């Protein structure tokens, strides 16, 4: 068996700004490449990433899913950083709420909020697709469901963004957002005070699991934080990318106007194309072979969702948005036991928003400069000035 190594810094600013060219090169270099700059192995091919995500015994999350030991210590015991059976116990607390019957009960609530927000923005005509819509709608939907107070919600999206950045190397982006990260985690810890959670909310259900002996106090706190963080960034950044696409490729919006049933497939395709959360790490528990490449036990391995989602071995013309592709097997929500627990909620939110916009907007136009975030782990926009024509 051979070993492949590269000196490429996946988190250099130029590669964060445009990751796909370097990912294409690394994918063609081999199935598993050791990146010397940060001492981890990288998986980029669809079949390899999917197999590794399904094999939690070999590719374990229990030693952390971040790159650095410092952040993995903070994640310890959370739903993100455990394996079965502990992981199953943590997920079970909100399983009923996130099941189809539980989501059906909140469908009208989500639609009512989408309608109110979109009506307000369309009446204005000009708005920022990120700061006024994408970073407001899913954040408030999840915060309402968790039962968080209105005061302090301005920390939620910046805090989740900074939290995801901390999964990667301790670089400039994390250091610049350290104060936001600390404020966010401090506020979320305070939300474990039940008196601050709305009666009947998901947050109250999580804290009730402490009383029943299902969860420890620490596990309840980390579960609340994990669901809040994971419940925002994928949806926020996918919606932002979709709005940009509607403005820059009007034919996509025209196709949706003609066939609104494509709202769901459009969301799946933007998730595949953009992969808002680029990937997570695992730790190998035994020596393993990936298509002839030996990865030793105890290795930190990044499962790169974004690279896998653009693997031409699996998706023809992977760099092209195809509204009729409907790639339900994409890996933007992960895969296996650690597949995103809230992915059905994300789909409900996105489909509801698209349908609400279709009923009110004739076309979108860019009305200013589009700005992208420099987050090394989450691919998303900072600002998207739009004009919505009624």
Image: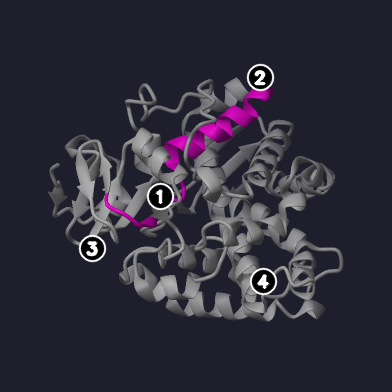
Residue 296: percent from left, percent from top: 24, 55
| Comes first in the chain, label 3 or label 4 | 3
Residue 313: percent from left, percent from top: 32, 25
Can residue 33 be seen in this snapshot?
yes
Pointer 2 residue:
259
Q: Quadrant of residue 209?
A: bottom right
Q: Nearer the viewer, residue 365 or 31?
A: 31
Single out the mark in the foreground, 3 or 1. Answer: 3
Task: Tell me which residue sits at (63%, 79%) in the image.
Answer: 189
Q: Nearer the viewer, residue 211 or 130?
A: 211
Q: Nearer the viewer, residue 120 or 176?
A: 176
Pointer 3 residue:
38
Image-based side of 9 in relation to 68, left or right: left
Name of the residue lying farthest toward the top: 258
Find numbered disc 4 in the image and state the secondary structure of the residue it sits on: helix
Magenta-highlighted residues = 258-287
Residue 23: percent from left, percent from top: 27, 42
Pointer 4 residue:
220
- Do labels 4 and 1 touch, CB within 8 Å? no
- Do labels 3 and 1 touch, CB within 8 Å? no
Pointer 1 residue:
278
Name of the residue lying farthest toward the front: 286
Find numbered disc 2 in the image and state the secondary structure of the residue it sits on: loop
Cα distance in 3D space between marks 4 and 2: 43 Å
Cα distance in 3D space between marks 1 and 2: 30 Å
């Amino acid at each position: 068996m051979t070993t492949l190594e590269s000196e490429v810094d996946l988190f250099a600013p130029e590669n964060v700004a445009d990751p796909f060219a370097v990912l294409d090169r690394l994918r063609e270099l081999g199935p598993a490449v050791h990146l010397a700059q940060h001492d981890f192995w990288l998986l980029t091919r669809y079949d390899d990433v999917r197999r590794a995500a399904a094999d939690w015994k070999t590719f374990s999350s229990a030693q952390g899913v971040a790159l650095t030991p410092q952040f993995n210590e903070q994640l310890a015991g959370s739903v993100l950083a455990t394996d079965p059976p502990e992981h199953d116990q943590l997920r079970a607390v909100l399983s009923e709420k996130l099941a189809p019957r539980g989501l059906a009960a909140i469908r009208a609530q989500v639609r009512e909020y989408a309608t109110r927000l979109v009506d307000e923005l369309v009446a204005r005509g000009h708005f920022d697709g990120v700061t006024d819509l994408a970073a407001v709608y899913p954040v408030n939907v999840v915060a309402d469901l968790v039962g968080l107070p209105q005061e302090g919600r301005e920390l939620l999206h910046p805090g989740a963004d900074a939290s995801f950045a901390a999964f990667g190397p301790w670089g400039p982006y994390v250091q610049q957002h350290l104060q936001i990260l600390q404020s966010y985690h401090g506020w979320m810890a305070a939300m474990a005070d039940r008196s601050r959670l709305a009666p009947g909310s998901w947050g109250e259900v999580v804290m009730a699991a402490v009383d029943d002996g299902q969860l420890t106090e620490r596990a309840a706190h980390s579960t609340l934080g994990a669901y809040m963080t994971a419940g925002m960034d994928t949806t926020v950044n996918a919606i932002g990318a979709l709005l940009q696409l509607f403005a820059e490729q009007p034919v996509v919006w025209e196709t949706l106007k003609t066939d609104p049933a494509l709202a769901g497939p459009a969301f799946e395709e933007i998730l595949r194309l953009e992969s808002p959360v680029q990937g997570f790490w695992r730790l190998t528990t035994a020596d393993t072979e990936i298509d002839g490449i030996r990865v030793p036990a105890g290795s930190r391995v990044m499962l790169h969702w974004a690279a896998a989602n653009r693997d031409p071995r699996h998706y023809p013309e992977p760099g092209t948005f195809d509204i009729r592709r409907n790639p339900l097997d994409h890996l933007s929500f992960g895969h296996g036991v650690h597949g995103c627990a809230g992915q059905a909620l994300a789909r409900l939110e996105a489909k509801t928003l698209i349908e609400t916009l279709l009923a009110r907007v004739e076309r979108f136009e860019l009305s200013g400069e589009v700005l992208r975030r420099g987050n090394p782990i989450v691919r998303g926009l900072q600002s998207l000035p739009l004009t919505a024509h009624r």
